[in-house]
Amino acid sequence: MPWFFTENEIDGRSTIIDGETAKHISKSLRMKPGEELTLVTPGGIQHQCRISAAGESVAVEVLYSKPCDNEPGIELTLYQALPKGDKMELIIQKSVELGVRRVVPVISARCVSRPDKKALEKKRVRWQKIAFEAAQQSRRGIVPEIGEAVSFSEAVRQSEENDVSIIFYELGGERVADILTGSPKKIGIFIGSEGGFEKTEVDRVLEVSGRAATLGKRILRAETAPLAAISIIMYEAGEI
């Protein structure tokens, strides 16, 4: 069943879809009147709809509505140190599929990639589009936010809002399962770039009641580590 996000809430038993979404429905998918699709509004309400007319705009009849129950029971924020090249695109795409709620790009001490502010904003717009497409493909109830790139210190400050924050460190730490024994609902994870984190950065997270964790004895690539960490956390939370 095709799955789409809408920018506006749906009030009533019918609505009109236009723009790129309408073009995708009528031109790319070649959907016809009588076929069904799902629309999800910004409030996380899932509307099962039947197409009544398709063209430049698509008119649909709302068959029934309900809260979308595809979202994880935990809110997971990924504080990702900027990797080289286009690895961030893969990280965002797969993180969204796995259930992350928010991704915050971080400029840490060992980041090789250090775009200027203008370039970072251009990248963020593209990253948000990737998150949108991944959320639709994986049938999420929301579109995860891609935050503005911040310094490591600012990321740590933001992380204090979490129930628990975990920094994954190649020199070792606790098992994720042991850290999550209290069933926290708001979790933040710090993942390094190709060079990992400096010890002073790890200490900074620990100073604000964060925890250092390990992903095992093997060293994972910058684009593998966040996906492994998110998968473990979702498993421990009963979401996989």
Image (cartoon, rainbow, N blue to C red):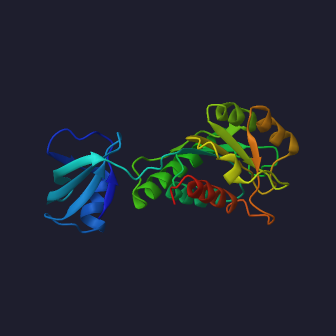
Residue 184, horizontal then vertical, whole percent = 59, 41
Residue sitting at x 69%, y 30%: 157
Question: For the N terminus, which image quadrant?
Answer: bottom left
User: In the depicted view, which residue is nearer to us: 16 or 117?
Assistant: 16
Q: Is residue 81 left or right of residue 72?
A: right
- Is residue 86 at least partly visible in the picture? no
Looking at the image, which is closer to me, 88 or 201? 201
In this rendering, the answer to whether 82 lies above or below 235 is above
Percent x, y for residue 57? Answer: 20, 53
Q: Looking at the image, is 32 positioned above or below residue 119?
A: below
Using the rendered image of the protein, determine whether residue 12 is visible from the camera's viewpoint: yes
Depicted 45 relative to depicted 209: above or below? below
144 or 57: nearer the eye?
Answer: 144
Q: Quadrant of residue 102?
A: top right
The mark tally for this picture is 0
Quadrant assignment, res 2: bottom left
Residue 96 drawn at (x, y percent): 52, 54
Residue visible at 27% across and 65% down in the picture: 27
- Residue 170 location, quadrant: bottom right
134 or 177, nearer to the observer: 177
Q: Is residue 203 left or right of residue 74?
A: right
